[in-house]
Structures are given as C-alpha cells and as structure tokens.
Image (tube, rainbow, N blue to C red):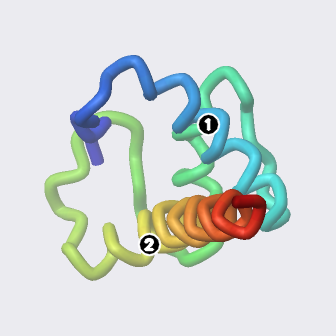
Amino acid sequence: MAKKKILVPDAREELDNLKSRVMKDMGYVVDSNNPNNVKYEIADELNIPLNKGYNGKLTSEEAGKIGGPIGGNMVKELVRLAQEQLQKK
C-alpha cells in the first residue's frame, strides 16, 4: 500500500496529524513521526500478512480490511468537524 497522492500536497502534514489523532482515539499505538505505520498494527490484529515494502500477494479484500478502518475513521472525523463548524455559523 503506497502513499496515495493527495490533491493538495501541502495538506500531507495535517492529514498525518489527523490520522494520528483519530487512530489514537481508536486505541491504537501511533508513532506521531510515522502515523502510516498503524496499518501494521491493524494487519497484525486481523492476521493479515502485511510486510514493509512489496505486498503484491495481498488481496484487495485484505487491503480494504487494513485501510478501511483508517480512512473510514478519518472521514467520520472530518464530517464531524464540518458539522461542528456549520453549527457555529
């Protein structure tokens, strides 16, 4: 699972901060210098063989089980923040 290209490259740091915060809130141990490593903890929890480097034998289903909780929880938090901002207007 390679780093995905984001539309606004300057947002990378804030997206990493969001990932760190959200996954910590979910109870995962997150290295704030490399929050992307939380995927290895999730993979281990799910018994999915995720290695650093090439993972070409990983199925789409397995990759989704690893990345889904990360991205899904980030989106939930972004929606929550947007709703909060709308209520302030």
- N-terminal-most mark, 2 or 1: 1
- Of residues 20 and 6, the one nearer the viewer is 6
Q: Above or below — where is 7 with respect to 57?
A: above
Local secondary structure at mark 2 = helix
Crowding near the residue tagged with mark 2, few <14, some 14–19, many ≥20 C-alpha atoms within 10 Å: few
Local secondary structure at mark 1 = helix
Quarter of the image where the C terminus is located? bottom right
Residue named by callout 1: 35
Residue projecting furthest to the front: 89
* Image coords of residue 27 (percent x, y): 84, 63
The residue located at (71%, 56%) in the rendering is 23
The residue located at (73%, 29%) in the rendering is 32
Q: Which amino acid does label 1 sit on?
A: Pro
Residue named by callout 2: 68
* Image coords of residue 44 (percent x, y): 59, 64
The residue located at (26%, 40%) in the rendering is 4
Q: Above or below — where is 6 with respect to 24?
A: above
